Image (tube, grey):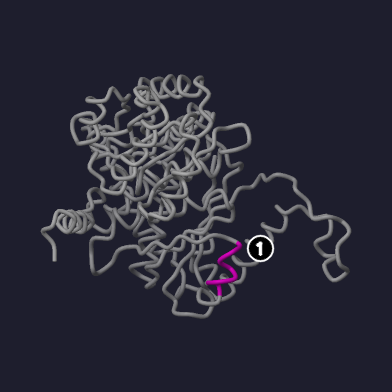
Amino acid sequence: MLHLDISATLGSAITPSRGIPDQEMKATGASMRRYIEDFLKERETGAHPWSMAPYDQKTAATVKEIAAQALAGGIRTVVWIGIGGSGLGPKAIQEIFEGPDTAEFILLDMIDPAVLDLYMRIIDWENALVVVASKSGETLETMSAFFLCWERLEGALKERAHERVIAVTDPLGGALRRFCLENGVRMLAIPPDVGGRFSIFTPVGLLPLALLRADTDRFLLGAKEIDTLCQNKTPEDNPAALLAAVQFLLDTRRDCPVRVIMPYAQRLESVARWDQQMIAESLGKAETHNPIPLAAIGTQDQHSLLQQWMAGPRACWHLFIREAEKPPVRVPGNVEESFGFIAGKTFGELLDACYEGTSRALTGAKRPHATITLPTLDEYHLGQLFFLFCTEVVLLGKLYRIDPYGQPAVEIGKKITKEILSGGGA
C-alpha cells in the first residue's frame, strides 16, 4: 500500500506560523468526516461514476480481448492520439511500462506540424495500430491528427485500414462515433457520465496498459483497495482526506496556493502532469482561493527551481512522490578521487539522497512538504495513486465549495477556435 507522510507540513515540524497547527487540522477533520459521508452517500445514488469504473468487470474483459487480438496481428507500433485526460493518462502508463519487449508507443497529443511531419515519415504504417481517444469525439487536435493518420493507414493497408484502428469515445454520439460506424472501426466506450480527466479506469487507461502487456487486473485491484481505505471516515486513516486537508489548509490559512507535484522518479513525470490537469481543470474556478498546481521533476528541477522555492515568496508547498524499490544500477567503483563518496553506490541511493537533501533543506527553511511513497512502481500501486488523486479532488471540491466536474472556461476557448477556423473569427 502506498504511504502518505504529511509530517513536514505540520506546525510541530516547521513552526505554527508556517505549518498547520494541530487545532486547525482537528477542526478541518470534523468537516472532512461529514464530507466523506456525503461522498459515500452520493456514490450510492449514482454520483461520481468514475469511482465505480474499477469494478466494471465486463469492460475490463473486453479491453483485454481487443488488445490481445491487436497484438496477435504482429503490431510493432501503437500510435495513440489523444489530448488532456485522453492523453496524459496513457502517456504516464507508457513511461512506466513501455520496454524492449513491448510495442513502441507513440503519443500524438499536439498539432505541431513539424512533429507530425516527422512521425508521418518514420512510422511503419503496415505494422501500426492507431488508437484515437476522445470523450466528445469532437476534439479539434485529436480529430485532425486522426484524419492525418487515417490517410496514411489507407495508403498502406487500403480497404483493411479499419482493422488497425480502435476508437475510445462516447458510446452515444459525436463525430468520431459516426466515423467509426461508417467505416467499420472498433469502438470502446468512455461512459457518458465520466469526464475525460476522470477516465483513467475506463478504456482510456486500461487499453494502453493491455497493449503494453501490463496487468490490468492488478491496476484495478490497487484502485479498489485504496478505495476501501479512502472510504474511512476518520481523516487520519484516509489518505485522500488527509491530503485534501493539507492542501486546503496550506492554501487558505498559510497562503501557499501553489502545489508543486514533484516525483523523484523519471517514470512518474507524466503522473505529475496528469495531476496538474486534474487539479487545474477541476478546481480552477474561483478567483479567491483554489489550488494552483505545478508539475516538476526531481532531480532536474533542483537545479532550475529550488533557489526560488527556498528563498523566493512563500507561495509554494511540495508534494513529493517516490518509489522505494529501484533497479540496482551502480556507479563504477573506479571514479575520480574527489568523487570517492559515490563510488560503488547505487543510483537509487543517489536519487534518495537528493530527495532527502531537498526535503531537509525545505524543512530547514520552514517550507511545507509532504511525500507519497510507493513500495514499487507497478500496476497495483499506480492504480492506487490515480484513485487517491481522483478522490482527493472530489473532497477538495467540498472543502472549497467548488464543483470539480466540467471545465466551462476551457469550452470558451474551444468555441472561439472553431469560429476562427470556420471563418467567423477576426
Say which element carries label 1.
helix
Q: Residues within 10 Å of mark 1 (few under 14, many from 20)?
A: some
The residue located at (72%, 54%) in the rendering is 347
Does the magenta portion include 303? yes
The residue located at (83%, 55%) in the rendering is 332
Camera-side residue of 184 and 124: 124
Residue 424 horizontal side relative to residue 184, left or right: left
In this rendering, is residue 98 above or below 111? above
**Picture coordinates of residue 136 (x, y %)?**
23, 40
The residue located at (52%, 68%) in the rendering is 12
Residue type indicated by callout 1: Cys
Residue 256 horizontal side relative to residue 31, left or right: right
Which quadrant of the structure image shows residue 202?
top left
Does the magenta portion include 130? no
Which quadrant of the structure image shows residue 45?
top left
Q: State how many labels appear.
A: 1
Work out which quarter of the rendered image holds the N terminus and state it: top right
Camera-side residue of 118 and 189: 118
Residue range highlighted in magenta: 299-306
Residue 74 horizontal side relative to residue 205, left or right: right
In this rendering, is residue 279 above or below 76? below
Camera-side residue of 64 and 23: 64
